[in-house]
């Protein structure tokens, strides 16, 4: 048996034709939809990049216990468990967060891996005097990096897929392997070649706009359109490379024995709800409701859709189950074998969100966004970790001065952990203005434009929320922070 995962970053499902888009050119995603099961209710769990990847490895939520960070010493890692079961696991990725402090323990879990440099502000090419000496400003570094990507084949996405295709060419006739092809695209900046941009003409005359900041929108309609066109152009490049993987599946007849998963870590706001990007705002559907495609050679179901609610935490147990590897008891996700085959439900509701922000719950019909208790000022809030690192740096000594050793927690396999007072958002208005509690009826209001006031529905969603927090070992203070019973 074999498995391939093609994983994108920041892929907005509403820009894909198979999810209703009428103007983005993505014929290979349409081709994929004809060869797989398309999931209509796939959701993120923990946001953003590395919290999502921790869930991809461990099959359990990250958001209740800590923020961005590496795998923990007590974590179950799906690729490592596969390796121990005799499956060769190979990662090829241009996702630079893997080789930063906050992601440094993920790629070593694979049997082999290949890294491709140059995405976003990756500290890659050195032109002294042009990049930030402190490596804090990504944009000057990105301008330097782009000078080394004048051709499509030079771009990190192209190199990543080329490495994946090399693996398939070498190993297609061998057995027991898992290949993860993971590109940072279409994450910002939306940098691609002119022939993709030409597919989306407009009348915009100003400086090119391919890198929105994480904030509220204040750009003109023309600027917004240009940014969306640049995103679409990069997505079309993603589509072209997806087609190369589908061609390889055809060429090597891999459809007979190879599980194929095409997914993303989260979506992206492109001026919807008057916001750019993610993390700062509530996690609206454009961010939380994700595309997911699965082909399972055991049932061979294709060209159909699944309505069951599934999440990122289900992918690790799905892959372990496919290879017959034991699923650890600490995993909370569910194998999707029967969901792919017959749309069998795996859960009533699911949690999603980001550490220290909303804790959201959805049952597929309603989304309930539970914000912090305003009177409590988003406190108490603690990180539980043995790997105290942020995205690009370690925790400072000042942050660690308030740490205590506690536990063990139910999932830390007997190990105590550090309990560290969490940093509050730098923008104090974030808690009071952006994290209001809201309830949406997705059936009546799929764009989430009109929060509803329905005490009966809210009470039911609170029951789901509290139950799931309890089942996932939420610390006591999370209930206090959110003003919830338990």
Image (tube, rainbow, N blue to C red):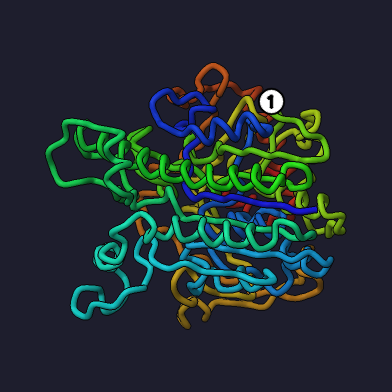
Image coords of residue 459 (percent x, y) = 67, 29
Q: Is residue 110 left or right of residue 98?
A: right
Residue 38 location in percent, x, y? 64, 31
Decide if residue 119 is on the left or right side of residue 401.
left
Q: Is residue 450 visible?
A: yes
Taking depth in this image into account, of 480 and 318 the one nearest to the observer is 318
What residue do we see at 61% from left, 64% from top?
91
User: Residue visible at 51% across and 56% down?
Assistant: 161
* Rendered view: 484 above or below 108: above
Question: Front-most of 41 and 371?
Answer: 41
**Location of residue 265 in the rendering, given as x and y in whole percent from the top left corner:** 55, 49
In the rendered image, residue 262, in percent from the top left (x then y), is placed at: 61, 44
In this rendering, the answer to whether 315 lies above or below 86 is: above
Residue 34 falls in which quadrant of the image?
top right
Identify residue for label 1.
Answer: 304
Dot 1 lies on which element?
strand
Q: Nearer the viewer, residue 455 or 427?
A: 427
Mark yes or no: residue 432 visible. Answer: no
């Amino acid at each position: 048996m074999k498995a391939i995962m093609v994983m994108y970053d920041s892929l907005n499902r509403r820009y894909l034709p198979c999810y209703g888009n009428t103007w983005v050119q993505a014929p290979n995603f349409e081709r994929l939809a004809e060869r797989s099961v398309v999931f209509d209710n796939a959701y993120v769990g923990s946001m953003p990049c590395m919290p999502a990847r921790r869930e991809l490895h461990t099959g359990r939520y990250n958001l209740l216990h800590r923020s961005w960070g590496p795998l923990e010493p007590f974590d179950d890692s799906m690729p490592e468990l596969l390796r121990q079961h005799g499956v060769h696991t190979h990662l090829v990725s241009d996702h630079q967060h893997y080789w930063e402090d906050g992601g440094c323990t993920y790629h070593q879990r694979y049997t082999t891996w290949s890294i491709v440099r140059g995405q976003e502000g990756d500290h890659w090419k050195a032109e002294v005097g042009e990049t930030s000496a402190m490596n804090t400003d990504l944009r000057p570094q990105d301008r330097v990096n782009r000078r080394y990507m004048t051709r499509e084949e030079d771009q990190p996405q192209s190199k990543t897929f080329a490495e994946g295709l090399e693996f398939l060419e070498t190993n297609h006739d061998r057995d027991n392997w898992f290949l993860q092809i993971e590109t940072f695209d279409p994450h910002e900046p939306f940098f691609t070649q002119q022939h993709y941009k030409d597919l989306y003409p407009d009348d915009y005359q100003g400086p090119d706009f391919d890198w929105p900041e994480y904030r509220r929108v204040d750009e003109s309609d023309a600027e917004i359109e240009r940014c969306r066109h640049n995103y679409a152009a990069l997505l079309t490049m993603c589509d072209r490379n997806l087609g190369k993987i589908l061609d390889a599946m055809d060429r090597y007849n891999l459809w007979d024995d190879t599980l194929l998963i095409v997914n993303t870590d989260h979506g992206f706001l492109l001026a919807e709800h008057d916001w750019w990007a993610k993390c700062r705002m509530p996690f609206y559907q454009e961010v939380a409701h994700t595309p997911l495609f699965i082909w399972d050679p055991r049932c061979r179901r294709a060209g159909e859709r699944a309505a069951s609610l599934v999440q990122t935490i289900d992918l690790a147990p799905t892959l372990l189950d496919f290879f017959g590897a034991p699923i650890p008891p600490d995993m909370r996700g569910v194998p999707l074998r029967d969901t792919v085959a017959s749309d069998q439900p795996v859960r009533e509701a699911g949690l999603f969100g980001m550490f220290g922000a909303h804790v959201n719950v959805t049952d597929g019909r309603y989304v309930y966004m539970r914000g912090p208790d305003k009177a409590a000022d988003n406190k108490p809030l603690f990180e539980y970790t043995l790997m105290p690192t942020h995205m690009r740096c370690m925790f400072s000594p000042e942050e660690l001065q308030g740490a205590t050793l506690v536990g063990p927690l139910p999932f830390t396999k007997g190990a105590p952990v550090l309990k560290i007072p969490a940093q509050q958002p730098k923008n104090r208005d974030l808690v009071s203005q952006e994290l209001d509690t809201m309830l949406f009826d997705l059936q009546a209001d799929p764009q989430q434009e009109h929060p509803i006031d329905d005490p009966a529905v809210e009470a039911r969603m609170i029951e789901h929320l509290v139950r799931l927090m309890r089942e996932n070992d939420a610390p006591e203070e999370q209930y206090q922070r959110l003003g919830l019973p338990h």
